[in-house]
Amino acid sequence: MRHETALFIDDDPQAQDTLKMVLADDYQVISSLTGEQGIEIVRDENPDFVLLDINLPDLDGLEVLKRIMGIPAPPPVVILTGYLISNCIDKNLLANARSNAFSYSLIKTNAMMLAH
């Protein structure tokens, strides 16, 4: 049975390891620590979906989203961040994310809940 492939673009190695462990039974997870590398992986390996951190060392996550959406037949992208939206994304950036999305949802989570 073929597992779907998830590309996780995040510069935090611990987050990478955790996600791989959580998704290992159902997905093949490919890791990228930078936006540029993630874009290349989308072009070369055509993952089924992308999990994208907003804060990356080389490119803003929304720029990565824009470039991925410019690739023919782009995969679905889920934007993730460990920061409060109000602390890391101004209203213009949020509007940009919405305009590049098929749909979107802001979800507040409890970090303690996610740890268990």
Image (cartoon, grey):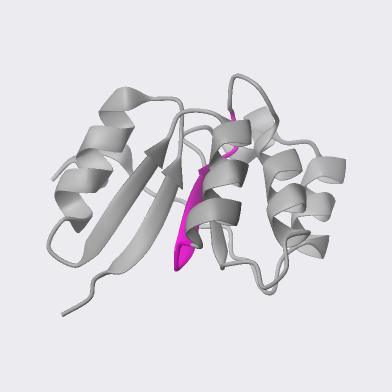
Return the x and y of residue 44 as percentages of the image width and height. 54, 53
Q: Quadrant of residue 58?
A: top right
Q: Which residues are magenta?
A: 47-55
Does the rendering let one see residue 79? no
Does the magenta portion include 50? yes
Q: Residue at x 35, y 63 (%)?
A: 5
In the picture shown, does residue 29 fall above or below 77?
Answer: above
Return the x and y of residue 87 as percentages of the image width and height. 65, 29
Q: Quadrant of residue 25?
A: bottom left
Extreme-top residue of the structure: 57
Q: Residue at x 80, y 42 (%)?
A: 93
Quadrant where the C terminus sits is top left
Extreme-right residue of the structure: 92
Q: Residue at x 59, y 43 (%)?
A: 40
Between 114 and 3, the one nearer to me in the picture: 3
In the picture shown, does residue 101 fall above or below 115?
Answer: below
Extreme-bottom residue of the structure: 1
Number of marks in the image? 0
Q: Residue at x 31, y 35 (%)?
A: 16
In the picture shown, does residue 113 fall above or below 70?
Answer: above
Between 104 and 63, the one nearer to me in the picture: 63
Does the rendering let one see residue 30? yes
Quadrant where the N terminus sits is bottom left
Return the x and y of residue 77 as percentages of the image width and height. 56, 60
Return the x and y of residue 60 as percentages of the image width and height. 70, 31
Q: In the image, is 100 to the left or to the right of 79?
A: right
Does the magenta portion include 103? no
